[in-house]
Image (cartoon, helix red, strand yellow):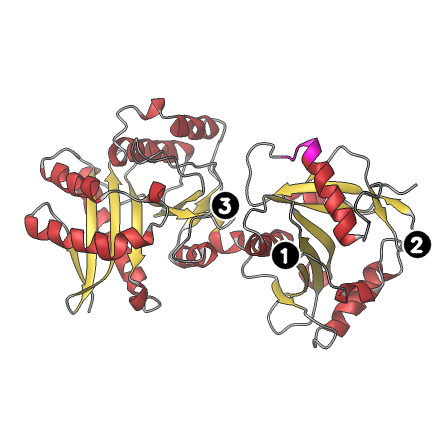
Amino acid sequence: MIRFHDLTATDADIALLTVFYQDHYAAEFPDPDERESLANMIEYLRLREQGWYGHNNYHIILASMNGVTVGCSVVDYFAGPNAGMIEFLMVVPAFRNAGVGRAILAETERVLESDATAGAGAPLAHVFAEINDPFLPTGAPDNLDPADRALVWDRWGFRGLDLPYVQPALSEAQEPVTNLLLICKTFGEPCTPRTVRSAVADYVRWAMRVEDPERCPEFQALAAHLATLGSVGMFSLARYIGHPIPHARPLTAPTDPDWTAAMALYRTAFGTTEYGIPESEFTQEYPVPLHFWTLRRTPTSAVAGLVTFFTLTTAGFGGYGLFTDDLRGIGALRPTIAQVELQMLADRPTTRGWYIEVAPKTDPAPFRAVGFVELPIRYTVPSPNGDELPATLMYKPIGRHYSPALPTKSEVKVAVREIREVIYGFQPGEPVHRP
């Protein structure tokens, strides 16, 4: 049975917090800019007992089983927006995958509901939280795969907020955190721009002790964006990382049971066109990772699509892509792109965007709808017979973006050079466009 203890500022509870912080908390925040100090946490407990929070509140909830700590949550309650903000929720690794996290969340929501009754005289409206964005790796180690974490919070009822969120620095000695995703669970009320603005302002004021959030650059940027919105977009965290469709399966060799079906699809769509390549090139060795995936609507259904792509040193590069009727009209393009981008980041975490080539007869609108932008350059694709075929080069930054994040002309030039040399076999120094 899990027992919960809402810590106070007593010596005994501070001792419990100190042990937990040293044994577990610090390890869960390998990025020092995301880690709250033990001294601050103790101070917040003392301030709460002094009435500093007013109608708001602050909680550190320890969970234990048979006297052993198994997890914890740190959460704020803000009476203005009638919302909670989960700063931290973790399960000790040895106790994961056993429902402990869900139990800690349930207790956290129960405590927040009590705060809402006392502070706002109404049922709790929202709970916010921050998670690492799977598409914004920083190089700092993470104790859990960010995509797996997103799936956990999705199962717990949270959705992503379509906003450019940056967490202000927790102290003068720390830096703002730019790789977070703000997520929210609602309880019957819509999550409006005004609600988000109020909740984040209170978070900055009470959790970071910034007296005037309006003077905080990170809050100013978010508030300016919110002012342009009539409503706040919310998205499924599962779909954000490419679940549940389509089901991608990597092909590694012609002996793979999907190879015949994949080649049949390829021949039908591309094999007889001037933009096709010999099938033998799909088994060619490249100096960078080549991925060839088949796509299905369900794990057991027939192959209904394919996608090929590379992770170059300068950027990602999309090769062939195809959906048959079984994958059309069900919104499969965006999750496919998410899966591709996560793989590119797994290959090379510094990847910041990728290119695709679009033939003249292919409608670029679906690619624009998911974030690709046509680059204003003359671009051609070399064919196996040596001809240069016209095409449009498009680019997409990895993940979400809210302002133009396009490569410079020099970056495009370097990427095109690598595409020509690595993918099409041009020799170093050979002109990019053959006469």
Q: Determine whether 14 is above or below 291 in the image.
A: above
The amino acid type, in three-letter code, at marker 3 is Leu
Q: Main secondary structure of the magenta part?
A: loop
Q: Determine whether 254 is above or below 217 in the image.
A: below
Query: Left or right: where does residue 82 sit relative to residue 264?
Result: left
Q: CA distance from mark 1 to mark 3?
A: 27 Å
Q: Nearer the viewer, mark 2 or mark 3?
A: 2
Residue 407 is a magenta residue: yes
Q: Name the quarter where the N terminus is drawn.
A: bottom left
Q: Which mark is residue 330?
A: 1
Q: Quadrant of residue 118?
A: top left
User: Residue sitting at 60 percent across and 32 percent down?
Assistant: 404
Determine whether the residue tagged by mark 1 lies in a helix, strand or loop: loop
User: Residue sitting at 29 percent across and 64 percent down?
Assistant: 100
Mark 1 surroundings within 10 Å by alpha-carbon count, few (fewer than 14), some (14 through 19), many (20 or more): few
| Residue projecting furthest to the left | 11
Q: CA distance from mark 1 to mark 2?
A: 38 Å
The amino acid type, in three-letter code, at marker 2 is Asn
The residue under label 3 is: 136
Residue 352 is a magenta residue: no
Q: Determine whether 24 is above or below 216 in the image.
A: below
Q: Which residues are magenta?
A: 406-410
The residue under label 2 is: 385
Query: Left or right: where does residue 15 sit relative to residue 279?
Result: left
Mark 2 surroundings within 10 Å by alpha-carbon count, few (fewer than 14), some (14 through 19), many (20 or more): few
Determine whether the residue tagged by mark 2 lies in a helix, strand or loop: loop
